[in-house]
Image (cartoon, grey):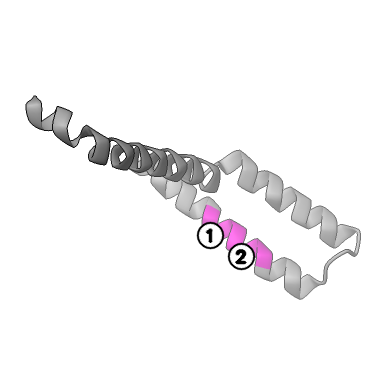
Amino acid sequence: MLGRVLTAPVLGPLRGVLWLARMIDDQARAELYDEDKIRGDLAELELQLDLGEIELADFEAQEEVLLQRLKAAREVRADV
């Protein structure tokens, strides 16, 4: 108990930074593996192709990245 009190001025801020880092990591993972967001990004990408805003090669490259993210998201969800 005394050790905690004596080390609080040094370790307190460090614990706060570590907590913040965990929260940011959790939020980033939640967004990265959000299947609805990925599907929305795929739909937006297809719309850009239909409107001629991007070339087919760009579409295919970006689509592959999004499909890999979707696959990873499903794997993460299956592991939980």
Indicate which disc residue 64 carries.
2
Across and down, in percent, residue 33 comes to 51, 46
Front-most of 34 and 14?
A: 14
| Local crowd size for mark 2, using a 10 Å CA cut-off: few (<14), some (14–19), many (≥20) | few
Across and down, in percent, residue 37 comes to 63, 43
Tell me if 50 is positioned left or right of 18 in this view.
right
Mark 2 and mark 1 in contact (Cβ < 8 Å)? yes
Is residue 22 shown to the viewer in this render? yes
Q: Which residue corresponds to the image point at 24% horizontal and 39% vertical from the top-left?
A: 11
Magenta highlight on residue 66: yes
Tell me if 4 is positioned left or right of 59 in this view.
left
Position of the N terminus, as image quadrant, is: top left
Q: Which residue corresponds to the image point at 77% horizontal and 50% vertical from the top-left?
A: 44
Question: What amino acid is found at the position of numbered circle 1 in the picture?
Answer: Gln
Position of the C terminus, as image quadrant, is: top left
Q: Which residue is mark 1?
A: 68
Question: What amino acid is found at the position of numbered circle 2 in the picture?
Answer: Glu
Up the image or down, 60 lies above or below 43; here it is: below
| Local crowd size for mark 1, using a 10 Å CA cut-off: few (<14), some (14–19), many (≥20) | few
The residue stretch that appears in magenta: 62-69
Q: Looking at the magenta stretch, what is its main secondary structure?
A: helix
Q: Secondary structure at mark 1?
A: helix
| Displayed quadrant of residue 67 | bottom right
Q: Which residue corresponds to the image point at 25% horizontal and 41% vertical from the top-left?
A: 10
Mark pair 1, 2: CA separation: 6 Å
Q: Farthest residue to the left: give it.
A: 2
Q: Farthest residue to the bottom: give it.
A: 57
Front-most of 31 and 13?
A: 13
Q: Which residue corresponds to the image point at 35% horizontal and 36% vertical from the top-left?
A: 16
